[in-house]
Amino acid sequence: MPITTDEAAAILEAWTPSSGGGGGITTGPQTFQGQKTFADDTTIEGRLYTGDISIYGSVTAEETWASESLRTAAGFPLEIGTETIVTAGTDISVAGAGSTPAPYVITNTMNPDYSALVSGVATMRRWDASSAALTCNSGELRLTFFTNRKAFTATKLQMKTGTTAAAATPTLCKMGLYVVETNGDLTLIGATASDTATMFRATQTVYEVAMTASVAMLAGSRYAMGPLIVTGAASANFAGVAPTGMTTGGAVLMSSTAPVLTGILTGQTDLPSSITAGSLGTTAQMFYGAVLP
C-alpha cells in the first residue's frame, strides 16, 4: 500500500529504531528506509496502520516539509537563510523567510529628522515654522506635501492658526489629507467634518481635530494636507514658512519640481475628492500640519 511523502515524514518524526528493525536514514541524504512496528489502530496523516510496515522511498529537495526538523531528520540540509533568525527592531522592519523564493527584506523606517514626532508625522520640521501669517484666502486649498516614514493608523489632523482668526461666520472650515498617486495626481483619503463654530476661530491656536474616518498611513508614501475655509468675511492665516528666496519666482521650484512641496487650488467650495497634478497652482507657502494617530 503506497503512502504519501507527508505520511512518511510523519512516521520519520516519531521514528524510534529498534535493534532488530533498524530505521531512519540509512542510504544518503535523499533516501530513507526502515521498518516500524505500530500498535493496533495507529493513525498517521489520516491513514490507519496496524502491525509491521516497511518504508522504502526517496524525496527530493523540492518537497515541502511540515517543519525544518522533519527536513533535517530526513537528511536534507536547511534551506539557505532559514537557519538565520532576523527580528525587527526600533525603526527596523523585516519581511520574508530568508529563502530563495522569499528573501529577507530589511527596511529602515526611521525618520532622519530627529525632531520628528514620536507619534504621527508632520508636514515640515517644527522649528522651520518661522511665520505666523501665511495667507489662506476664502476658497483656497493650500497643500503642503510630505513623505511618511512609518506605517500607522491616522485618526486626527492638526494645524495652528497664526495672527488672524476666521471671522464670523464661515460657510465651511475643514482640513483634508490627500495621497499622491504615482502620476502626481491626488486622492482625498481623510478629512475633518466642517466646523464653522470653533475651527480656526482663534489666533495662535493649535487645532487637533478627528477625521471622519481613520486612514492607514503607509511608510514611504507621499501625502499632502492643508486647510480649506469658505467665507464671506475675513479668513484665517496659519503657521508655517515662506522661504524668502522662493517668494518671488521661486514658487515654481516649490510647486513644479519633483518632489513637489507645495500647491494651491483656488475657487473651491469643498474639499475635492481628486486633484490632477496639472491643476495645482504654484505657491511658496508651506503650512505646518500633522497627521496623528
Image (spheres, rainbow, N blue to C red):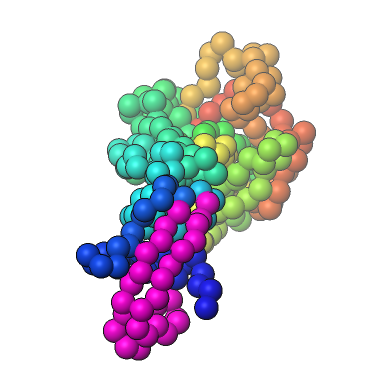
Residue at position x 71%, y 30% in the image = 281
Q: Which residue extends farthest front?
A: 20
Q: Position of residue 229 (x, y in %)?
A: 59, 47
Residue at position x 36%, y 53% in the image = 26
Residue at position x 52%, y 17% in the image = 243
Q: Which residue extends farthest bottom?
A: 41
Q: Position of residue 113 (x, y in %)?
A: 38, 26
Instruction: Read off the magenta span.
Output: 31-60
In this rendered view, identify the residue nearer to me: 86 or 111: 86
On screen, residue 252 versus residue 57, left or right, reads right
Inspect this view and state whether residue 152 appears: no
Q: Which residue extends farthest top?
A: 245
Residue 52 lies within the magenta run: yes
Residue at position x 67%, y 21% in the image = 257
In this rendered view, identify the residue nearer to me: 279 or 216: 216
Q: Position of residue 62 (x, y in %)?
A: 54, 51
